Amino acid sequence: MLFDERPKTKREDLFDRENELNGLLTNIYRPLIVLSGVRRIGKTSLLLVALNESKLPFILIDARKLKDNYGWKDIYELFSQALSSSLDKIADIIRNIRGVSILGTSVELSWKGKNYVSLADLFDHLNQKRIIIAIDEAQRLRGPLSREVKEAIAHAYDYDRNLTFILTGSEVGLLYDLIGIENDKSPLYGRYFYEIKLDRFSKEKGIEFLKKGFEENKKEANESTIEEIINFFDGIPGWLTLAGNYIISGKSIEEVKEISIRIAVNEISNLIESKRNVSEIVAKRYKNTLKCISEGNNSWTKLYDCLSKRENSTLSSSTLSNILQQLENMSIIYNYDFLDPVYKEAVKRL
């Protein structure tokens, strides 16, 4: 079902992603694949469909579970949970690894003491079988232990030829920062990765998606409603799915817009406040910058003037540069414009 709000798992439910899916499956034997795109664009759906169609054993790690200042205990719990979910496919490999305990359907990795297993050792053992290790929202691995994690992945890249790592990320700049594509000190610097960038549907495809979704649910939606949904949400699949479900439930298009804006306000606030060491003053400056951009200040000079007036103070050029870079890294804006039209409306309420 196209309007299933959960990530898709079957090809027939994946709309207009044939090229991306085939590209991912064709390159599934590469050591490192990156799947990028803004929030709600369908990265997890594409990943899950590809994993299921590959027929290969896989370990799926949801890095969103990590807190900002995560420690080794958090990392090992994350990997333990992922291994537990795939135990039926890898039990023969991990059963005899030092530092790995299996109790029923649960796997526990020892992260300290003389019997601990390093991530590099774990990858070496998993290399006995053709396995995909997928890390969803991998930018969350940025943090105090990110170098050690990247060193383990770099080791596997070089020596474990049966392993493929797939990293997804909606905060694309932060994902690139994790990999270190411009940082020659990063353990992964200089290593080629195959990248698939997911884009929004064209207007025509978006309309087709909505019509098919309504048809599957035996719901008639007039052309003006569909047109208004497309004009407001653009072609971002997650928003179109949300709108379709609420229209089917009896909500008006205005009610759907209001719900989506409230969701976006909460997301933007959480994104800003979740950044490390962000004070209340700095968080407010991020929000003021976004408000200025939403008002059409689409150049350095216009934005600088707007922000200075809002804060009634003079900013340094480096301060504004850093704010813009961070907002781009979080995939909220690019080139003085919003990547998600709903966010543009939402920032007016911050």
Image (cartoon, helix red, strand yellow):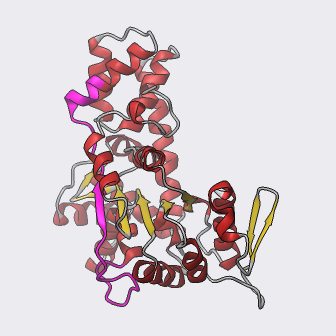
**Residue 319 image-quadrant placement:** bottom left
Q: Is residue 322 above or below residue 41?
A: below
199 falls in the magenta region: yes
Residue 43 visible to an observer of this rendering: yes
What count of labels does the image hold? 0
Q: Is residue 173 left or right of residue 251?
A: left
Q: Position of residue 194 (x, y in %)?
A: 29, 65
Residue furthest to the right in view is 103
Q: Position of residue 19 (x, y in %)?
A: 25, 44
Q: Position of residue 236 (x, y in %)?
A: 34, 39
Q: Is residue 144 left or right of residue 156?
A: right
Residue depicted at 45% across the width and 27% down the height: 3
Which residues are the magenta region? 180-208
Q: Is residue 3 left or right of residue 110?
A: left
Residue depicted at 63% across the width and 67% down the height: 79
Q: Position of residue 125 (x, y in %)?
A: 59, 76
Residue situated in front as seen by the camera: 49 or 321:
49
Q: Is residue 206 above or below residue 198?
A: above
57 falls in the magenta region: no
Q: Is residue 182 above or below residue 218?
A: below
Q: Is residue 145 left or right of residue 76?
A: left
**Residue 68 image-quadrant placement:** bottom right
Residue 314 visible to an observer of this rendering: no
Magenta-colored segment: predominant secondary structure: loop
Residue depicted at 48% across the width and 46% down the height: 52
